[in-house]
């Protein structure tokens, strides 16, 4: 978890994570945009300077200089876990997962239905403000199915989840995986820990990389904050002469 302000969904997640208050307080310092990380988007992994790396503790932080410019960061709360084997990380019960698997039917069983949704599923999409970029008024199921068949990328993952839930509820089988309670994973640690995701530039090499600090203790927060403040001052000094 790495967002702030915290809504009701976040509060429930924090309860599940068993996060301490000082960790939650760290989230308040996050920038407004924190949607990248070591293992997201198109991060390389070739072992060169532009490859993401992980460091285990605060003592492993290196000095900032003109070849290591820290330009962005966010704190995140993590509780170690493994994928749930009962639901294959889907978080769904057996019947609902089957409906989800049939959506694209990658196993080619003849049950594919992503281009054959029903009117109640269209209604659900419309109520969730989907399809509105392509239709001015709520369309019929036939119109949506014709539209999706004619596009390389029709329905996205959000549409899929809405349609799967609607169909499963109509059939009376909707439910979450009882083993993981819908999370898709099983915790292997008793409580959460705090991580710091950073983004470094190397101007001379003309590249950048993510650096993930994996473990921060509460008594180490002042040192971490000073480190981030040093980076902020270095960035601000470059533009200080602008009027």
Image: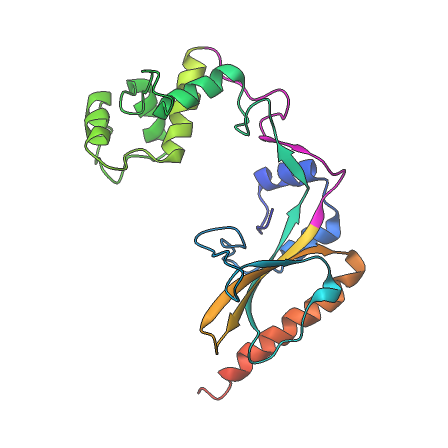
User: Which secondary structure type mostly characterizes the magenta part of the structure?
Assistant: loop
Residue under the image location 71 percent in, 52 percent down: 23
The correct choice, above or below, for 117 with respect to 11 in the image is above
Range shown magenta? 172-193
Where is residue 52 drawn, in percent x and y?
Answer: 55, 59
Tell whether position 128 is magenta. no
Relative to 21, is 121 above or below? above
Colour mode of the rendering: rainbow
Q: Position of residue 85 (x, y in %)?
A: 60, 25
Q: Which of the two residues, 53 or 167, is positioned nearer the viewer here?
A: 53
The residue sitting at 39% across, 17% down in the picture is 167
Left/right of residue 111 with respect to residue 66 in the rendered view: left
Please state if 30 lies on the left or on the right of 140 as rendered.
right
Residue lying at the far right of the rendered structure: 219
Residue lying at the far front in this picture: please name it. 47
Viewport quadrant of the C terminus: bottom left
Q: In the image, is 222 to the left or to the right of 168?
A: right
Q: Nearer the viewer, residue 175 or 112?
A: 112
Look at the picture and state if 216 lies above or below 83. Answer: below
Q: Quadrant of residue 111?
A: top left
Q: Choose between 126 and 106: the one closer to the eye.
A: 106
- Please report the residue visible at 20 percent of the width from the left and 21 percent of the height from the top: 142
Horizontal and vertical percent for residue 211? 59, 61
Q: Position of residue 212 (x, y in %)?
A: 62, 58
Which residue is located at x 37 percent, y 25 percent? 106
Q: How many marks?
A: 0
């Amino acid at each position: 978890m790495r967002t702030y302000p915290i809504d009701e969904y976040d509060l429930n997640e924090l309860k599940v994570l068993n996060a301490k208050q000082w960790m939650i307080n760290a989230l308040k310092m996050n920038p407004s945009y924190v949607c990248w990380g070591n293992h997201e988007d198109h991060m390389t992994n070739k072992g060169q300077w532009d490859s993401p790396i992980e460091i285990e503790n605060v003592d492993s932080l290196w000095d900032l200089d003109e070849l290591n410019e820290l330009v962005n960061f966010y704190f995140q709360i993590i509780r170690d876990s493994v994928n749930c084997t009962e639901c294959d990380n889907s978080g769904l019960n057996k019947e609902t997962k089957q409906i989800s698997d049939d959506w694209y039917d990658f196993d080619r069983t003849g049950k594919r239905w992503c281009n054959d949704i029903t009117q109640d599923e269209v209604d659900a999409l419309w109520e969730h403000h989907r399809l509105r970029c392509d239709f001015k008024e709520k369309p019929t199921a036939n119109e949506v199915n014709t539209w999706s068949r004619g596009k390389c990328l029709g329905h996205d993952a959000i549409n899929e989840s809405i349609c799967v839930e609607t169909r499963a509820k109509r059939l009376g089988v909707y439910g979450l995986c009882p083993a993981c309670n819908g999370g898709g994973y099983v915790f292997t640690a008793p409580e959460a820990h705090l991580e710091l995701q950073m983004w470094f530039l190397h101007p001379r090499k003309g590249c950048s990389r993510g650096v993930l600090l994996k473990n921060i203790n509460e008594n180490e927060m002042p040192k971490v904050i000073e480190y981030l403040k040093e980076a902020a001052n270095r960035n601000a000094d470059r533009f200080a002469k602008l009027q």
